[in-house]
Image (spheres, helix red, strand yellow):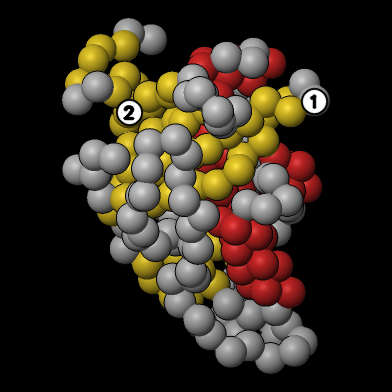
Amino acid sequence: MALRERSGRRRIGAGSAGVLLALGLTSCAGDDEPDPTTAPPATESTSPSEPEATGTERPEVEKPTPPDAMSRDDVAGAEAAAQYFLALHQYVYASGDLVEWKELSADDCQFCANVAEEVENLHATGGYAEGGEVTIDEVEGSPPVEGNDFFRVDVVASEGPSTRVHGTGDPTEMSGGTNLLIFATRWVDGGWQIREVQVEEPSFDG
């Protein structure tokens, strides 16, 4: 796949993954790693304690496969881990399967914990999510700076419309958009760990 430089980031011409980016915007206080970021749910709803029959069928969703580059402990490995995490984001909302998501999440990753909680609440009432295909436009990783063991990975991603179907059968339509996602990743015990994810406007330069 040919890569070309644009605005300091490598543009991926044909790379795409389906994810559901229900993310909030925060500010970045420094260049070392993203600040802990809360990812509030796009829509809060009250659902019955027991799922009700909806008459809708859950879409089949394929579990993402970790890319080979994730076995590397360098910048390329960090970039691969960030992109895999985005693919898992769509998968967990659609399937409710959080095994790989939690394995990749650091214990103190607030963004990761917020997503897991929202997914658990959605699926506990018989809900699920579908749609929200995202094109990963640009990826740029950088090695840790002095005094910090986190790799930074910036990902510009454009999301399409998506739908969340709740246990009552009532859908919540969500519009898409384009965001810059800033990952703080770390190589720990032979594998990658996501420390935090910060979401900004694409024009953010911090």
Q: Give the amino acid at mark 2.
A: Glu
Residue behind mark 2: 138
Eyeballing the image, is 160 above or below 100?
A: below
Quarter containing the C terminus: top left
Q: CA distance from mark 2 to mark 1?
A: 28 Å
Q: Residue at x 55, y 62 (%)?
A: 129
Taking depth in this image into account, of 176 and 142 the one nearest to the observer is 142
Tags 2 and 1 in contact by the CB under 8 Å rule? Answer: no
* Residue 64: mark: none
Location of residue 46 with respect to 4 vertically, above or below: below
User: In the picture provided, is 46 more to the left or to the right than 202?
Assistant: right
- In the structure shown, which secondary structural element does the residue marked by tag 1 occupy? loop
Nearer to me, 8 or 62: 8
Find residue 51 and report its horizontal and vertical position in percent: 73, 83
Judge from the rendering whether residue 180 lies leftward or rightward of residue 59; answer left or right. left
The residue depicted at 50 percent of the width and 81 percent of the height is 44
List the residue tagged with mark 1.
189
Closest to the observer: 190 or 20? 190
Q: Residue furthest front?
A: 147
Mark 2 crowdedness (10 Å alpha carbons): few <14, some 14-19, many ≥20: many
Q: Quadrant of residue 169?
A: bottom right
- Say above or below: 186 vs 132: above
Q: Residues within 10 Å of mark 1 (few under 14, many from 20)?
A: few
* Residue 186 percent location from the top left of the image: 63, 30
Q: Residue furthest top?
A: 2
State the residue at coordinates (61%, 48%). Answer: 91
Tell me which amino acid carries mark 1.
Answer: Asp
48 left or right of 144 in image: right
